[in-house]
Image (cartoon, rainbow, N blue to C red):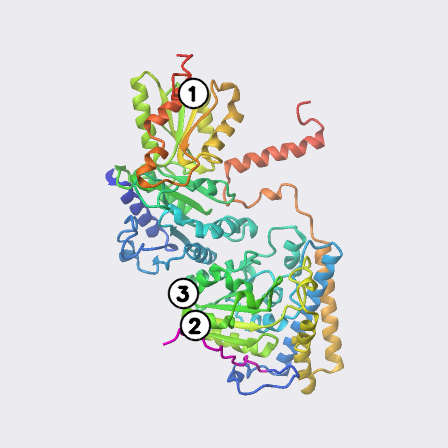
Amino acid sequence: MSTMTFGRAINSGLRRAMERDSKVVLIGEDIGMLGGVFRITDELQKDFGAHRVIDAPLAESAILGTAVGMAYRGYRPVCEIQFDGFIYPAFNQIVSQVAKLHYRTRGRVRMPLTIRVPFGGGIGAAEHHSESPEAYFVHTPGLRVVSVSNPQDAFLMIQQAIACDDPVLFFEPKRRYHTKGEVDEEAGLDSYPMEQARVEVSGDDATLVTYGPLVQVAREAAAAAREEGISLEVIDLRSLSPIDFGTVEASVRKTGRLVVAHEASRTGGLGAELAASITERCFYHLEHAPERITGFDIPYPPAKMEHHHLPNLDRILDGVDRVLDRRNSLGGGEGH
Amino acid sequence: MSLHGMGPVPQEDLIQLLAPDGSRTGGSGFEEWIEDVDGAALQGLYEDMVVVRRLDQEATALQRQGELALWPPLLGQEAAQIGSGRALRKDDFVFSSYRENGVAYCRGVGYADMLRVWRGNAPSGWDPYAVNMATPQVIIGAQTLHATGYAMAAKFDGADSVAVSYFGDGATSQGDSNEAMVFAASFQAPVIFFCQNNQWAISEPVRLQAQRDIADRAPGFGIPSIRVDGNDVLACLAVTRQALERARGGGGPAFIEAVTYRMGPHTTADDPSRYRDPNELEDWKGRDPIDRLGRLLEAEGLLGTDFTERIRAAADRAANELREACVSMPEPGELDVFDNVYTTPHAVLAGQRRDYQRYLASFETGSGGTS
């Protein structure tokens, strides 16, 4: 075990993947000499060469489109999209090509791309630098989508994503890059499946599901709730496509109550999918309609307004109060 | 000081080795690239073009008869496709649009594979690795980036394979095509951009895409370019060979604008009479690529009755095989829609497949639903 930051853990995982397979190449803007604007690829070009850590001209569609061509020739490209809001120029190549080529070619051509996306808010950034576009990709068949919440998962899952023969969108919560944690660098690729959710905190009264940057907030919310005598079960979803409904369902069958939290806008988001699917799967175990605590359906707001938009501990606990019929901002409280 | 490049546009002649009247054109400097093309080779190019035109006509007929959902005819573009296609080596890799069935023919694509996607039986036709040609790209210009990435990877490998991207005049307006040229130039990738300027992007004339010759764009990206008579199979063969050899030797990308004409509709769903002057088609018929080579063969005594009969029989045989491959194609299975979305099992999709299978089974057993 060693202690390292979230960012260093991804760097270390990338290094492992590149050592393991000479077909792994990195391509993105400023990822070479600079090591990326977040330094995630620090030193990798120096150690592996400019043909394996490729500074790309500033064209996201081309970063993805050329990665497709490299994959045709047996390479395993890892594309870095510098910021979440810059992924849209590449949307066509991701959705129309990367996601569909295996299907289109009836399994002949594989697209083992990993698309790394620093995402989410909370860093006081300019427009287009704090977005949460994961639902677009979750809605796209052919892609796998994951989001990591801690250094250990970051280290392991970046390697699993690269080793996966399907394209994987890898969402990194940028506001957690400097968070430190214990990382077992000996953990093997099969030590915990990429698409399995994890129960972070066990509890009995309500299930709180989230992923990426809000996992830490959810843990804090569970600790605060415990002081009020409420036992929350916190689930880190980890894989957003496919969603590990089994783990969530087992928890909701126990607690009877579901709260989903994410930074992304509400309508058509992961919370909607979870609420619908869990309701279908265990309707008679639910004591209350699922609640969603999410970003509003607004463009990502300016830095001094983002704290209104981002779900925080109090908003999450307000949602917990709602599913428990406790007094909350929208009324209620008859049950307690 | 005036703005650079705003003066009159110099109209250089197209590279041409064969005039519309079938006479050889000298002085282009490209003659050396076809020195090995003897009488038999000329007859071979002629046969290719005749067979490909016949296949194309048969496929159009199959669409009219309801056997294909759609077909994108290549009528008029045979020289551009056969000339460039026959210049390629087996280990080169083609990324084309949907109109390059003449190139696919050169690569050895089977007839059923050529039609599969247009009959609606499969999401695409062939195994790209079996013929070193990606299946047709429908998103305009997207394949220029795939070719560039493939070429970058070939260079990583130290191989001398070249990637060739085929696209049309319309595609040159797409961001992807322009980004592809940036990347190809920056990384000196061994990629050929082969633009068939067939004058029309469905109903939009080329002047809506470009105010100057399309080939003029590439030098601005640092890529040498050439305009070639796209209805001259020898010129297309020669310039493609030169570009390939240059790329193989580490010379980097090249851009070829083959000036040709789409004599048919964009696809069988299109009606060019709504937007095109019929006189234009008549003009281009005078520059027909097959007639042109035929006149040369005739002048050189290579178009005897035996030969023409043999070619006609070969074309008819190909057309019959194409038709048979089309109508005898097995129908897809009812659960095939779920195949190959992912390389490894996906729990959510597996659940949808299982439920749909039960739904279908409910009709057979009569025990489905809530009864």
Badge 2 marks a residue whose secondary structure is helix
Q: CA distance from mark 2 to mark 1?
A: 65 Å
Instruction: Please report the residue visible at 31 percent of the width from the left and 55 percent of the height from the top.
Output: A30
Mark in front: 3 vs 2: 2
Tag 2 residue = B219
Q: Quadrant of residue B319?
A: bottom right
Q: Quadrant of residue A316?
A: top left
Tag 1 residue = A323
Q: Nearer the viewer, residue A67 or A220?
A: A220
Q: Which residues are magenta?
A: B1-17
In the rendering, at what x and y percent does residue A168 appear? 43, 45
Instruction: Please report the residue visible at 55 percent of the width from the left and 81 percent of the height from the top.
Output: B34
Q: CA distance from mark 3 to mark 2?
A: 22 Å
| Badge 3 or badge 2: first in the primary sequence | 3
In the rendering, at what x and y percent does residue B305 appear? 76, 81
Q: What kind of residue is marked 2?
A: Pro
Discs 3 and 2 lie in a common subunit: yes
Q: What kind of residue is marked 1?
A: Val
| Image: B155 above or below A197 | below
Q: Residue furthest front?
A: B1
Instruction: Please report the residue visible at 38 percent of the width from the left and 16 percent of the height from the top.
Output: A327
Instruction: Please report the residue visible at 51 percent of the width from the left and 58 percent of the height from the top.
Output: B142
- Mark 3, chain letter? B
Mark in front: 1 vs 3: 1
Q: Residue furthest left?
A: A3
- Mark 1, chain letter? A
Q: CA distance from mark 1 to mark 3?
A: 59 Å
Q: Can residue B95 be seen?
A: no
User: Residue B155: which disc?
Assistant: 3
